[in-house]
Every structure is written in C-alpha cells, then in structure tokens.
Image: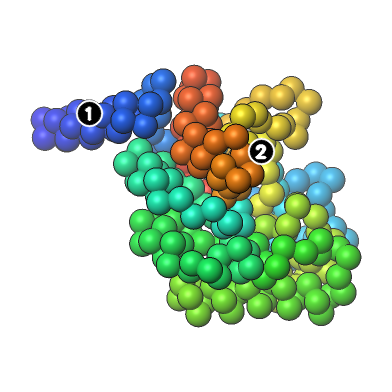
Amino acid sequence: ADAAAEAREARAVLAAAAKRWDLKKVPLTAPAPPEKKPEIKAREGFEVDGQEEDGLPPVFTTVPTKEKVVFLTIDDGAEKDPAFLKMMSELKIPYTVFLTDEEIKDDYGYFKKMQARGVTLNNHTLSHPYLPGLSYEDQKREICGMQDVMEKRYGKRPVLFRPPFGNYNRDTLRAAKSCGIKYAPIWSEEVYVDHWEYREWDQDLHPGDIVLTHFRGENDWDGTMTDMVRRFLDRITADGYAVARLEDYL
C-alpha cells in the first residue's frame, strides 16, 4: 500500500507543479528505461563511407522504440534562464544538452547546476562552425577542444556530440570518434517558442523522436525558455507522449 500512496503523492506534487507552470495537463511520466538497449545505427541516407567498417559514430534522428516517448535536446547555451532550471526540476522533465564553448564561457556555473540535477552535458563544438567546410585537423580541434573544456569544467568527456546545424562529413565522424565520441544524434523535430518544424512529410511526432530546441530568450524569440517548454509539453502530452532520457536508450 505504501508504494501506491507514494505514487499518489508524487502525482499530486507533479499536478501542483503543472498548475504552477500553467500547463494544460500534467505531463506524462516515461516508462522505465529498456532493459535491453536498442541497436543504434546511422539513419538510412545519413551514413558516410566506412560508417560500419570504421565503427564511426552513427548520425540518427529517432531512437528505435515502440514506447510513446520523445527526447528533448537543447543546443548551444546562449540563454541562461534560472526559471528554466526550476521548471524542469519541478516538473521532473529529463533533457540532454549539447554545449558550445563560445556560448557558455560567460557562465559555466549555470550548466554545473544543470549537471548537479542529473542532466548530461554534451559536445556541440568550441565555436559552432560549419564543420564540412573545415579540414580534418580543424574539425578535430573543434570537437576534441570541446571535450577538453567539458572535462575541465564538468569532470567528464562526453560520448554524445551534435554537429552544428546538423552538418557533417566523413571527417567529422572520424574526428569525433578519435575524440571519444560514440553517437552523433541530430533531430526529427525542432521546437521554437511559437512553432514546430518537422523533418518528416507527415509533420507529426513518432515514438523515439529526438526533438531539438535552443537556449534562447526574448532577445531572439517571442517568449522565454519556460514559454517554449510549456508549448512543447502541452503539445506532446495532448498526443499521449512522455519525455524520456536519451542516455537511457543508448
């Protein structure tokens, strides 16, 4: 009976938080992570020469699962909104971030707080260049250089890397692998404060989709980080989706 009472209490706390953050419905809770992790391969058409043979990090937009879950990923780190940290903690929403040194170096501490709350901090290069335009050496400098920053500031070298703009070539993935990267997730949907953009023709969500958004505030958007999260959660909850933790599936 204790477990049932605890579950009820947790639900009540979540319902109160949903109300406080003005959500239309209480966000759904993701199922337990899979015991057996799905096999992650490069999305068809997203492979490079030597993808399998050289064991290069796969580029993918969706994680193979039948569960109605999506994964929220947030890039760069320009906006550092304390309300966002509070909202995500209170609503217990998992997310994964991909950081660019140029955008975070004015406040490494903000992301330290995020890390302390169990968020995985990942690599999005030092300066967010268009990587395919760079030599192998320069790409390696951008990616391995960010690994060094992450280790120095956050005590860990990430295994996830997202190429800026989702652009990459074979050298990108070779360089990433040499820097200790295992996966290169990109995205299926992109969320802004006022609209969504979809990769697929059906313009809809699918189980296992990776959703991208950015650390942006009212300077760039018609709203705040918390406005964006509210709209994101209202939309996915209405469709019966929960937010799961990407790392739990890799």
Question: Is 182 drawn above or below residue 206 in the view shown?
Answer: below
Q: Residues within 10 Å of mark 1 (few under 14, many from 20)?
A: few
Q: Nearer the viewer, residue 150 or 43?
A: 150
- Amino acid bearing label 2: Glu
Q: Nearer the viewer, residue 129 or 241?
A: 129
Q: Nearer the viewer, residue 197 or 160?
A: 197
Q: Identify residue for label 1.
A: 12
Residue most extreme to the front: 219
Q: Position of residue 37 (x, y in %)?
A: 53, 49
Q: Identify residue for label 2.
A: 190
Q: Mark 2 and mark 1 in contact (Cβ < 8 Å)?
A: no
221 horizontally vs 201: left or right: left
Q: Position of residue 212 (x, y in %)?
A: 62, 43
Question: Is 37 drawn above or below residue 188 in the view shown?
Answer: below
- Amino acid bearing label 1: Ala
Q: Quadrant of residue 29?
A: top left
